[in-house]
Amino acid sequence: MKIESRLAQIGSQEDPATGAVSFPVYQATAFRHPKLGQSTGFDYARTKSPTRAVLEEAAAKLESGDRGFACSSGMAALQTIFALFKQGDHLIVSLDLYGGTYRLLEKIMSRFGVTASYVDTNDLDALETLRTPSTRAVLIETPTNPLMMITDIAAVASWAKAHGLLTIVDNTLLTPYLQRPIELGADIVIHSATKYLGGHNDVLAGLIVTKGQALSDEMAFLHNSIGAVLGPQDSWLLMRGMKTLALRMERHEFNSVKLAEWLDEHPAVESVYHPALPAHPGHDVQKRQASGSTGIFSFRMKDARTIEPILRHLRLIAFAESLGGVESLLTYPAVQTHADIPEEIRRKVGVDDRLLRFSVGIEHIDDLIEDLGQAIEAAGAEIGGERA
Ligand SMILES: *Cc1c(COP(=O)(O)O)cnc(C)c1O
């Protein structure tokens, strides 16, 4: 069955007792046992809960994995994954990383003796240089946010496999609708489902999908033992959002490509980072391993003084953190999402004070271009009369 059909049908045929097309919210945390030694398959909701189980099964299938685990946030999912590692273990991680993941590694995992090195994960020589006998895994974000750096997942996964390392891919930006890392050789996929999977800026959730029996069993043990699981209401809300994922991603992509092309021609803009633009260095790899682009891209203004007035003059597009929802949001990474990353690293990758990150929503493209256009125009007028 095609992925569009599977998405639309999530949970729709899972409740034979009533035939409910929208799978019910089972709020129960305890489940009656028929008799000693017997179970309905449900004992206690942290271990397994009916509404969450339908979501987890769907996630595993969508990502072509063996098991899915729903967590209370993307960070909870990452923390659960990082519990695979022990004191002395070393990870190799994408350079232009989600700020919260960097914080978790540097401020928390470091206390437990787990260390990380940050590198452009597309550079296999650099990966090999960083590898030590203690290295256990490589964690990739592709595309990265905000700089849209693309990593060849199959190349890294086969390198990792040859050295006995796990490949973990944060697939938040593309979703299984556009990219399925396990099919390319990854062992673990993680999602901030708060973003595109939920899609409406109204549910905080994380998902883990594992490939392989031993790894799946270990993750089930960690998920239950740590307990950062997703509640039934939020599991339901997430499935409700995922049903329309295919339609939403199509519109996000259409709008983001149009806006990127428009900004690329704008005299006030220095550069645009969008993998759909042929000049983007990751264009060919992304085209090969993903079936499309996401709604996220970044652009750098020529003049840093325009940033503050642009954000102030926006009317339709919201100046806000987060990404992946139906509403367009513009973020200033240097002071918002990436504030926890030291300035030295930020500058090295290019997250400077002229960079803006767009999470393009599903509004009409004409309205988005008009709003951003008037904001840039007004900013230009403010900083000194000349065009910004
Ligand atoms: C948002 C995000 C996270 C963290 O997820 P939360 O749901 O906010 O905890 C992790 N990785 C990426 C790429 C993200 O965008």
Image (cartoon, rainbow, N blue to C red):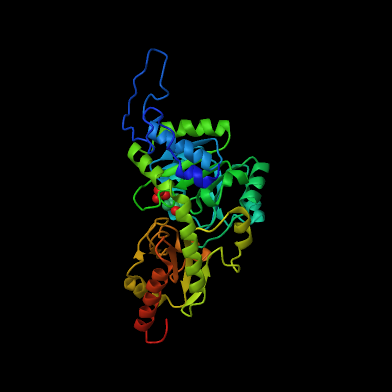
Residue drawn 49% across and 34% down?
219
Q: Position of residue 96 (x, y in %)?
A: 51, 58
Residue drawn 42% across and 52% down?
195
Question: Is residue 102 or residue 290 the one in the foreground?
Answer: 290
Q: Position of residue 5 (x, y in %)?
A: 50, 44
Residue drawn 42% across and 37% down?
12
Q: Residue furthest bottom?
A: 385
Residue drawn 43% across and 67% down?
365
Q: Quick one: quadrant of the C terminus? A: bottom left
Q: Quick one: quadrant of the N terminus? A: top right
Q: Quick check: 250 above or below 63?
A: below
Question: Is residue 21 or residue 70 the one in the foreground?
Answer: 21
Residue 258 visible in the shown view: yes
Q: Position of residue 81 (x, y in %)?
A: 49, 40
Q: Quadrant of residue 166?
A: top right
Question: Is residue 331 or residue 79 the one in the foreground?
Answer: 331
Asked if residue 100 lies left or right of residue 285, the reply is left
Residue 98 visible in the shown view: no
Q: Position of residue 333 (x, y in %)?
A: 42, 63
